[in-house]
Amino acid sequence: MSWEAVPAATRSFFENFRRIHGARALFVSQELCRLSEAFDRAGLRYATFKGPTLAALLHGDVSRREYVDIDIIVPRQQIDDAERMLGEFGYRAADGPRAYRRAFLAHLRQYAFVHPDSNLAVDLHWNFTGTHVPFPLTPEALWQDLDTVIIGNRAVTTPSRENLALLLAGHGTKEAWRSLGWICDFATLIDRYPDLDWLAVHERARANRCGDTILLGCAMAEELAGTPVPRALLGAREKSSRVRMLTGRLARDLREGLPDSPEGENFSDFHLCERRIDRIVGALRLAFIRTSGDYDAMRLPQLLWPAYYATRPFRLAAKAMMALGRRTRR
């Protein structure tokens, strides 16, 4: 569409958004560089992904992608050191004290920290998904193959291109590809790195029981961004009825703007499981993992927190019965 044909009020809205986002992107990028320098100085291993890193790597400019936080992953054994480092920069845990986080949020394998002055959030990861589902990229593989991207005048550590493909496909599938931005990221990755060994990337995902994530990412990029599926994966994509089914359903949901279901907990991350046995095992694990929802439903003193292991299955069963009752009344 010609920019001149866009109504003046709409042009003004987008131009104002661009200015605000550009200023915010520069601030977030500056903060990322400060944290990167501090991690390096302290000898802490780290890698950053998404946010300004992904904007610079795929789109050539930190302002050419929307984001609201900084994502950093560190080795599991360095989480406490990384938390202290963030604390020295003024960041505070967004989800309560350490004892609470370790009891009810550790299964997510990431914690959120927020700076009270700027409201900037840093998501500190030691893995890429919860303990109950597989993921195409493991932390061990990440640390074996790192790269850098230039942000300002600093080289910031990032995943390699192959690992980035696994990461974006896994994250998009985990979140049911409900953002067009994530699909554009994956489509841009396909376009920007035509020499990427997609067959090897797919084999690595399959080895982690998540091969469908790569095929689904490629199929969604083709369906919604017009990006051709890499030739090496055409045969595998065509053979997978599950990928075809998910592509049709997720693309339809995105086009029609269907709301997330308010019933029950979010199980979209089970799309990561290409095997039924993994979905069954994941559901069983999730049934016995203490979550913040358990605490909110029945606030016990810390001494009694182990009791949530016994009460959680009953709480989930009650929620399932209530959801079934609502559907029956409709």
Image (cartoon, rainbow, N blue to C red):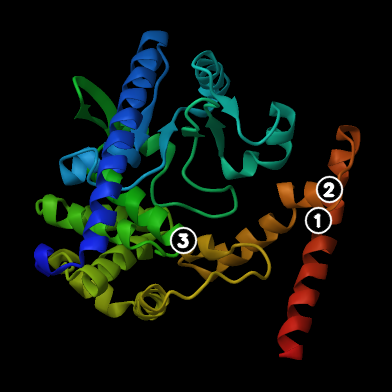
Residue nearest the observer in this picture, 196 or 296: 296
Residue that label 3 marks: 272
Amino acid type shown at disc 3 = Leu
Q: Is residue 65 left or right of residue 299?
A: left
Instruction: Residue 202 in the image: state x and y as whole percent.
Output: 28, 58
Classify 10 Å Cα crowding around label 3: few (below 14), some (14-19), many (20 and above).
many
Q: Residue 141: x percent and y percent?
A: 36, 38
Q: Amino acid at mark 2?
A: Tyr
Classify residue 293 as left or right of residue 108.
right
Q: Quadrant of the C terminus?
A: bottom right
The residue sitting at the top extreme is 41
What is the number of the mark on residue 308? 2
* Residue at 19% from the left image edge and 72% from the top image edge: 234
**Are discs 1 and 2 less than 8 Å apart at CB?**
yes
Residue 208 x/y as whole percent: 42, 53
Decide which of 71, 270 is in the foreground and name it: 71
Residue at horizontal 25 percent and vertical 46 percent from the top? 18
**Residue 283 drawn at (x, y percent):** 65, 62
Residue reaching furthest to the front: 8
Give the quadrant of residue 35. top left
Vertical arrangement, residue 260 with respect to residue 73, above or below: below
| Closer to viewer: mark 3 or mark 1 | 1
- Compute the Cα span from label 3 to label 1: 24 Å
The residue at the point 55 percent across, 35 percent down is: 112
Secondary element at tag 1? helix
| Marking on residue 312 | 1
Res. 234 visible in picture: yes
Labelled pair 3, 1 in contact (Cβ < 8 Å)? no
